[in-house]
Image (tube, rainbow, N blue to C red):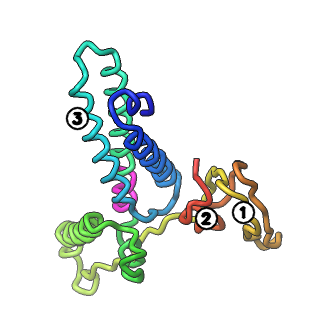
Amino acid sequence: MEEFGDAISSEEETVTAQKVLKTLKDIWLNERNCPELLQHQTDVVDCMLDQIHQMEDNLCKLKKNDFRVVIHRQELDRIRYIIADYLRVRINKIEQYAIHILEQEGKRSPEDAVLSPAELKFAREFVANMESHFTLVALRHMPSNFQHFDKDKLTIAPNISSHVFLRAKRNITGVVIEGDSENRDEEVDLDENSQHIMQYKPIAEYVKSGAVQLI
């Protein structure tokens, strides 16, 4: 990326592309390793797609036999993979937790929405299609008192008590680790750049604020 920018783009564009790519990698890793669906980052994805288009335009200015073309094509393919995988992971989570996500989304303000407008439309259509499928295949053949589509019985919530690997991006004090029936709650401090494995629940807000990076 940096060599590419130095060769065929301005210094300002290089810095911008590098910064956006770093942000994209961070949100991709967080989404991949997080048990719940995080807030959508459509602006970052759209910005990176714009950067890709600019890079492709700059590539067209190079001679076909320039060895840099192959290198930069591979880099562009890698970036496209990250974007595609990020979106795929989000779609998989939406399909798995659709009912739960929509219930939670209804309690949020537009500014705090986890789903993008396109994802919200997809989630609603997914649940509607699931209800139609259940009705067509099973419910309509049952006695009338069993034909109601009960979303509560089909709701699956992510396991926010599952363990994750993380890196603290700054010093964090007083992270409360909930104890069980035999142990008390415990407070731990996370040093900047230290790595840990712990339950997702106590560090969830730090992931969302950017203070913790999942790895």
Q: Are marks 2 and 1 in contact (CB under 8 Å)?
A: yes
Displayed quadrant of residue 69: top left
Q: Residue at x 29, y 46 (%)?
A: 49
Displayed quadrant of residue 12: top left
Report x, y in % for residue 2: 45, 33
Q: Residue at x 35, y 74 (%)?
A: 102
30 is within the stretch colored magenta: no
Q: Which residues are magenta?
A: 88-96
Looking at the picture, tell me which residue is in the foreground, 120 or 64: 64
Q: Residue at x 78, y 73 (%)?
A: 181
Vertically, is 177 above or below 46? below
Residue to which mark 3 is pinned: 57
Q: Residues within 10 Å of mark 1 (few under 14, many from 20)?
A: some
Q: Are marks 1 and 3 in contact (CB under 8 Å)?
A: no
Number of the front mark, 3 or 2: 3
Q: Secondary structure at mark 2?
A: helix
Q: Residue at x 25, y 41 (%)?
A: 53
User: What is the number of the mark on residue 206?
Assistant: 2
Residue with the most extreme top position: 65
Q: Residues within 10 Å of mark 3 (few under 14, many from 20)?
A: few
**How far is mark 1 from mark 3, CA to CA?**
43 Å
Q: Check the picture and name the quadrant holding the N terminus.
A: top left
Decide if residue 134 is in sight here: no
Going from the N terminus, do you reach mark 1 or mark 3 first? 3
Report x, y in % for residue 158: 49, 65
Residue to which mark 1 is pinned: 172
Chief SS of the magenta region: helix
Q: Amino acid at mark 3?
A: Asp
Q: Secondary structure at mark 1?
A: strand
**How far is mark 2 from mark 1, CA to CA?**
9 Å
